[in-house]
Amino acid sequence: MLELNVSKMTPEIQDQMSRVDNQMAELCCIIERSLEADGICQVTPNLEFFRLSKPAGPIHGVAKPSFCVIAQGSKVVLLGDSAYRYDPRNYLLASMELPVVGDIVDASIAKPYLALRFVFDPMMVAQVMLDAGMSMTKGTAKVVSGMDVSQIDTRLMDVTLRLARLAVAPAVEVAVMFPLLTNELIFVLLMGTQGERMRQIGMHGGLAARIAGAVSVLHNRFSETLPVPELAQGAGMSVSGFYSHFKAVTGFSPLQFQKRIRLLSARRMLFAGDVDVTGAGLRVGYEDASQFSQEYKRMFGKSPSKDLENRWAG
């Protein structure tokens, strides 16, 4: 990452950075008060806090449509061939469910990794867009990637901090203020640097929305054989257009995307103790056990049986 040269900044920018630093310090206190040990605190169904006292990764998972802020520490998220690093100066925004690999690279007992995630309901975003007079089909010719990192500013940090304070607020205050602050957060993001990406979450009819529909089909029917022409037809696009737009948004080809969802699902089944290795492969669509084991090892670095042994040993 590029180091910020404070001496070349205007007084206004330096003042904004100082305010963000103070706001981050308060956010650290709120998260530490909510999580005295490593773990996750579910503040509301949409708002989560995270704490970790040592580097961790690779962490395989599926990013939800969400806004993520790190109060202390740093993290790298891999999506396809792209790497997104963020820290207390930057936030991450994801517009759809994407298979990612995360590495928490800066965390210690003295200074644990402290983070916040807000998961969006697309209907909430759509309602704010309607209230703000934004077109629900605008930008049909423009496709942006489903994830990016941008510098956080004082306005965005202000609403984020007020949301975080609800973790220590009375229940009646949470009930009244949470919907209002949620709408404010959505509006600020819609009007900010990543507004186009934010609009992907609530938009209907545009290219991004049609790709999001295909992503949903792959999540819901990952164990089936879904030819690209069928997915393209469902999205109302040519095969070549669908393929290029899908990769631009998700970072993967449709086949790569489905494979990752299959393997992530198989891993969850194994760790939950629902099935054995052979059963997990069959459930997610692999008829060849050898192919399942090879692709599982290629993605997670261990065969399914070894991965399971390490899971129980850990």
Image: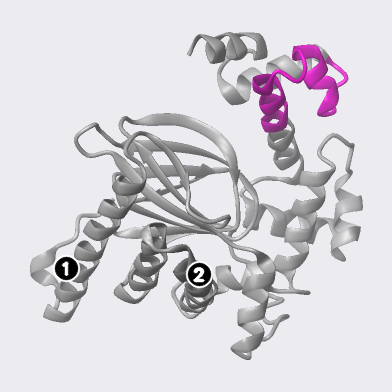
Between the residue at mark 1 and the residue at mark 2, the CA separation in whole angstroms equals 27 Å
The residue singled out by tag 2 in the image is 178
The verdict on residue 282 being magenta is: yes
Question: Is residue 75 positioned above or below 191 on the image?
Answer: above
Position of residue 204 in the picture relative to residue 31 (left or right): right
**Do the residues under discs 1 and 2 have CB atoms within 8 angstroms?**
no
Q: Give the foreground label among 1 and 2.
A: 2
Residue located 68% across and 86% down the image: 135
Helix, strand or loop: magenta stretch: helix
Packing grade of label 2 (10 A; few <14, some 14-19, many >=20) is some
Disc ID at residue 162: none
Q: Amino acid type of disc 1?
A: Ser
Q: Residue 74 in the image: state x and y as whole percent.
A: 32, 45
Q: Is residue 126 above or below residue 313?
A: below
Q: Quadrant of residue 99?
A: top right
**Residue at the image position 16 percent from the left and 68 percent from the top:** 18
Is 245 on the left or on the right of 37, as rendered? right
Of pointers 1 and 2, the one earlier in the residue sequence: 1
Residue 313 image point, x, y percent = 51, 9
**Which residues fall within the magenta stretch?**
263-288
Q: Amino acid at mark 2?
A: Phe
Mark 1 closeness class: few <14, some 14–19, many ≥20 residues within 10 Å: few
Q: How many marks?
A: 2
Asked if residue 204 lies in the magenta stretch, the reply is no
Work out whether residue 3 or residue 158 is closer to the camera in this orientation and state it: 158
The label on residue 18 is 1
Look at the numbered disc 2 and give the secondary structure of its residue: helix
Q: Is residue 134 visible?
A: no
